[in-house]
Amino acid sequence: QVQLVESGGGLVQPGGSLRLSCRSSGNIFSPVVMGWYRQAPGEQRELVADISISSTNYADSLKGRFTIARDNAKNTVYLQMNSLKSEDTAVYYCSADIRSVRGGPTSRYWGQGIQVTVSS
């Protein structure tokens, strides 16, 4: 099995910054794609950003403010969030498409979610 544990959320004022971390552990051969999604109250879960070995992908509305990065040695993905706005308030979920054996299929795993609240 694979576990994803998020950290770094909390309350921040508008214009502030937060850095989320998500570490994967367990039966991991290689994390193929790692990413962040978010879900605001009453809204559907949406992609924030994801990152593969060679590329990154961002929601158009977040380009320039959010940056995703990964540390393969630590099986960890990060999300640096700058110039935060009240509309960024949501539960943020880490995801990872992980291959557990060489040449095997990938399976998607999710973290438990972490609250980010942007408010004065």
Image (cartoon, rainbow, N blue to C red):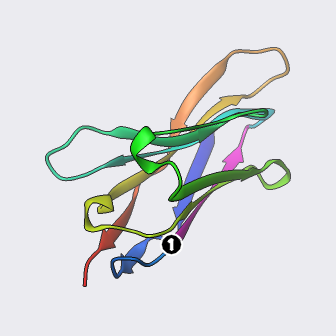
Q: Is residue 56 above or below residue 88?
A: above
Name the quadrant of the C terminus: bottom left
Residue 90 covered by magenta stretch = no
**Residue in the image at 58% along x and 50% along y:** 4
**Residue in the image at 75% along x and 37% along y:** 28
Q: Could you tell me residue 98's position as x and y percent?
A: 67, 31
Q: Is residue 26 rendered to the left or right of residue 84?
A: right
Toward which corner of the image does residue 2 lie, by quadrant?
Answer: top right
- For the residue pair 85 and 50, the one nearer the viewer reads as 85
Q: Which residues are magenta?
A: 18-27
Looking at the magenta stretch, what is its main secondary structure?
strand
**Residue in the image at 50% along x and 68% along y:** 82
Residue 19 covered by magenta stretch = yes
Q: Mark 1: give few (<14), some (14-19) or many (20+) Cα within 10 Å.
A: some
**Residue found at the very far left of the displayed protein:** 42
Q: Could you tell me residue 51's position as x and y percent?
A: 65, 39
Give the tally of numbered discs. 1
Q: Could you tell me residue 70's position as x and y percent?
A: 73, 50
Residue at mark 1 = 18
Name the quadrant of the N terminus: top right
Label 1, secondary structure: give it. Answer: strand
